[in-house]
Amino acid sequence: MESTEPTKLTNDNINFESVLLDLKILLNDKTLSFQSKSQLQLIFQFINLRKMGYKVMDASQIVAESIEKRKYQAELIYIWTKNFLKNKTILTFKHD
């Protein structure tokens, strides 16, 4: 049976310093919404934990727990990070 699991984020294919620098630059952008900055901060924390050697799901779980959230939020952090690494953007949603 074929796996539908997304491509893994491995330490081999991440330039941590470059990603953290990109995130720092974005976090200093005064035009970003509170929601966008919060998302960037969670991605930043996740990348720092990965840099320290934490496994993907452990890192996302730790970040989620740091904001008193659970598995769903951990999965979101993983998805946001994956998107950021691929597109250098964050996922935003408009509320009507």
Image (cartoon, rainbow, N blue to C red):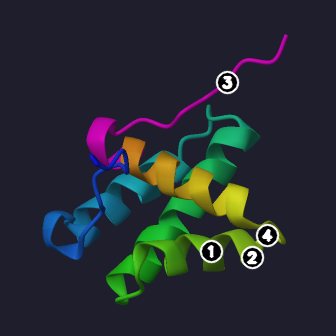
In the picture, the quarter occupied by the C terminus is top right
Of the residues under marks 3 and 4, which one precedes in the sequence? 4
Depth check, mark 3 against mark 1: the one in front is 1
Q: Secondary structure at mark 2?
A: helix
Nearest the viewer among 77 and 34 is: 77
**Residue placed furthest toward the front:** 1
Residue receiving disc 1: 61
Tell me whether circle 1 and circle 2 mark residues in contact (CB < 8 Å). yes
Of the residues under marks 3 and 1, which one precedes in the sequence? 1
Q: Give the percent coordinates (x, y) of residue 11.
A: 23, 74
Residue at 49% x, 48% y is 79
What whole-number distance in Å separates the C-alpha atoms at marks 1 and 2? 6 Å
Residue at 39% x, 45% y is 84
Residue receiving disc 4: 67
Q: Secondary structure at mark 3?
A: loop
Q: Give the percent coordinates (x, y) of residue 86.
A: 28, 41
Residue receiving disc 3: 93
Residue at 62% x, 50% y is 39
Residue 65: mark in rendering: 2
